[in-house]
Image (cartoon, helix red, strand yellow):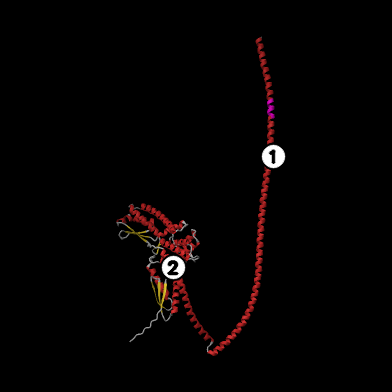
Amino acid sequence: MTTATAIIIGIVCVVLGAIIGMLFSKSSLNAKAKFIIQDAKKNAENLIEKANVQAESIRKEKQLQAKEKFLELKSQHDADIQSREKKMQDAEKRIKDKENKLNDELSKTGKLEKDLDRQIADYSKKHEILEKKQHELDIATSQKVEMLEKIANYSADEARNELIESLKAEAKTRAQAHVQSIMEEANLNAKQEAKKIVIQTIQRIGTEQAIENSVSVFNIESDEVKGRIIGREGRNIRALEAATGVEIIVDDTPEAILLSCFDPVRREIARLSLHRLVTDGRIHPARIEEVVEKTKKHIEEEIIEVGKRTVIDLGVHGLHPELVKIVGRMKFRSSYGQNLLQHSREVANIAATMAAELGLNVKMAKRAGLLHDIGKVPEQESELPHALLGMQWAEKYGENPEVVNAIGAHHDEVEMTSLLSPIIQVADAISGARPGARRQVLESYIQRLKDLEAAALSFDGVSSAYAIQAGRELRVMVESGKVNDDQSSQLSYDISEKIQNELTYPGQVRVTVIRETRSVNIAR
């Protein structure tokens, strides 16, 4: 009984404890829930307050931005309106200025018209008075002529003709004498000054000669090398000709091979390539192409180096690289047997000396002299004359207009516009006209002599003409009965003018007219 009671009492206590625990836990949970709800309400109120504050700040910021944008647009609009107003004001001002100018011109035109009308009226009055006086003069002249005809037994036409003929002969004689004296004085002064400048120039400049043509000779040690150069079935020589563009002539000439080509650069490439192939001993198509390619690069480098060295030696600065390359190509070009680079150097030095004597720009003259024949070395054939082609290149590469004009005008292809142009022309003539400078074809030389003699024989009174001194002097024999002493001076001048205007020649031609009277009698 006691045990059971104890168990029951234990169970009841446990149940009562559980019930009491549940009650206490429920009350504590209710307290916690209330606290959480209150805390949540406070947080929500804080968040709402913060959101309201942030929204207010954003609203104020947006309002401020809207105001700034409005002010910006307004200022821009005002600026546009001001600029338009300014433009309108400027336009109105221009219109007013034009109106004022037009009014001034109209007023001036009105004044001029009034002056013109007044001058026309004055002219009409003077013309009427002049006609009256002319009529009175005609009457008086006719009366005097009638009186003179009665006195001299001469008609007016006969007297007039005789007087005119006598005056014409006298005037012509006096004019020829006067012209001759003026020409002699001018020639004396001009020749003295010109000779001084030319002599000083020639004395200060040393000249070298270089003779080239369209054929180069390649010397070999023995004729056995010719077979190796030709190759089996001619493959080597065909490969060499195709690679260089040069015609290779292997004939019976002992220990020599001819290289024929009008392009001296290609001819030099072929010569150097042959030299390297013969020296190396390996001659076959593949090796030929390799050697020719290397030689081309070497020649191109040499061309550039020659151009640079030339411009440095002459003191020509700031030259375009393409022009430097063209100057280097001149080394391998000849004109009438005269090396083009040497000729251009001569012309540059001569022109610089003349420019110094005349007080002109020496550097500009030297530059134009060096570049005056660049049109003779085109990489591709051109139909233009070399002077015009060189002028185009100089203009393309930014040369001075005076230099451009000097290049184009040194053969009178274009009109000379500066004092530099005639200097370059004279320097070119001096360089080409000196003895031994150029080698001309015999046919052209003979034709030039014939043209000189024909020019003299085309004048009346000329019996014979002879070109002497290699075409630098023309001796003209005239008939003494048709040409007197005074007319001979005029004849020499006319012949020289015709030669100068119609013929092409280097240097100058001296015209000498010879007149003689021979009286022959035979004593028997």
For disc 2, the marked residue is 196
**Vertically, is 439 above or below 476?**
above
Give the number of marks: 2
Q: What residue type is labelled 1?
A: Glu
- Residue 324 figure quarter: bottom left
In primary-sequence order, the first of circles 2 and 1 is 1
Structural distance between the alpha carbons of marks 2 and 1 = 102 Å
Say whether marks 2 and 1 touch (CB < 8 Å): no
**Vertically, is 87 above or below 488?**
above
**Front-lying residue, 44 or 473:** 473
The local secondary structure at tag 1 comes to: helix
In front: mark 2 or mark 1? Answer: 2
Asked whether 35 falls inside the magenta stretch, the response is yes
Q: In this view, does 284 lie to the left or right of 498?
A: left
Residue located 66% across and 9% down the image = 2
Q: From the image, which quarter does the C terminus lie in?
A: bottom left
Q: From the image, which quarter does the N terminus lie in?
A: top right
Main SS, magenta region, reads helix
**Front-lying residue, 47 or 355:** 355
Whether residue 379 is visible here, answered yes or no, is no
Give neighbour class at mark 2: few <14, some 14-19, many 20+ (Cα, 10 Å). few
Q: What's drawn in magenta, residue-wise?
A: 31-38
In percent of width and height, residue 480 lies at: 41, 80
In percent of width and height, residue 97 lies at: 65, 62
Asked whether 391 falls inside the magenta stretch, the response is no
Residue located 68% across and 19% down the image = 20
Q: What residue type is labelled 2?
A: Lys
**Front-lying residue, 225 or 152:** 152
In percent of width and height, residue 475 lies at: 40, 75
For disc 1, the marked residue is 56
In percent of width and height, residue 276 lies at: 35, 54
The local secondary structure at tag 2 comes to: helix
